Image (cartoon, grey):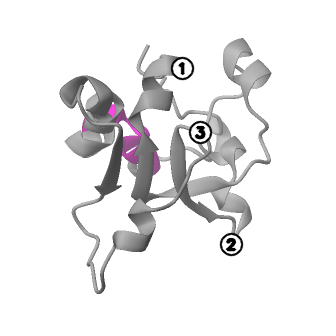
Amino acid sequence: KFYFENRLENATKDNMKLRNPKYLPILNHLRFYLPEMYPKLHKILFLDDDVVVQKDLTELWKIDTDGKVNGAVETCCGSFHRYDKYMNFSHPLIKRSFDPKTCAWAYGMNIFDLDAWRKENCTE
């Protein structure tokens, strides 16, 4: 039903509500349009609104993503942080494009290479 759906046998009213895009914060969707919103920027450091910055972030800005679209922190500290828990692998495009055992990343802090994003047409 929703784009994250993959375990209907374990679905409850509460956890299906969390998977419905209309209940996700607006910034979760907004990040997909950053290259269009800021056409003159080459890179952006994106922090969620609940991140508390406790020191200078200059070193993060210096990270070279080597042409990759996103630099982020992996969160593999449990089996629930793998793609197969978030994505619908019964969909042929997802099945072809992603490894279900790949680690997800923490959305709270991302360095986006907006030039690479535009080149790869990620928003499309």
The three-letter amino acid code for the residue at tag 1 is Glu
Residue 119 x, y percent position in the rendering: 50, 19
Q: CA distance from mark 1 to mark 2?
A: 30 Å
Which quadrant of the figure contains the C terminus? top left
- Residue 38 visible to an observer of this rendering: yes
Contact check, label 1 and label 2, Cβ < 8 Å? no
C-alpha distance separating marks 1 and 3 = 9 Å
Q: Specify whether 90 is left or right of 27.
A: right
Residue pictured at 59% horizontal, 39% vertical: 68
Within the image, what quadrant is residue 59 found in?
bottom left
Segment tinted magenta in the rendering: 15-22
Q: Which of the marked residues, 1 or 2, is nearer the chain's N terminus? A: 2
65 and 98: which one is in front? 65
**Magenta run includes residue 18:** yes
Please provide percent x and percent y for residue 23.
27, 42
Q: Can you identify the residue that label 3 sits on?
A: 68
For label 2, the SS is loop
Q: Which residue is mark 2?
A: 77
Q: Image point 68% across, 23% down: which residue?
A: 94
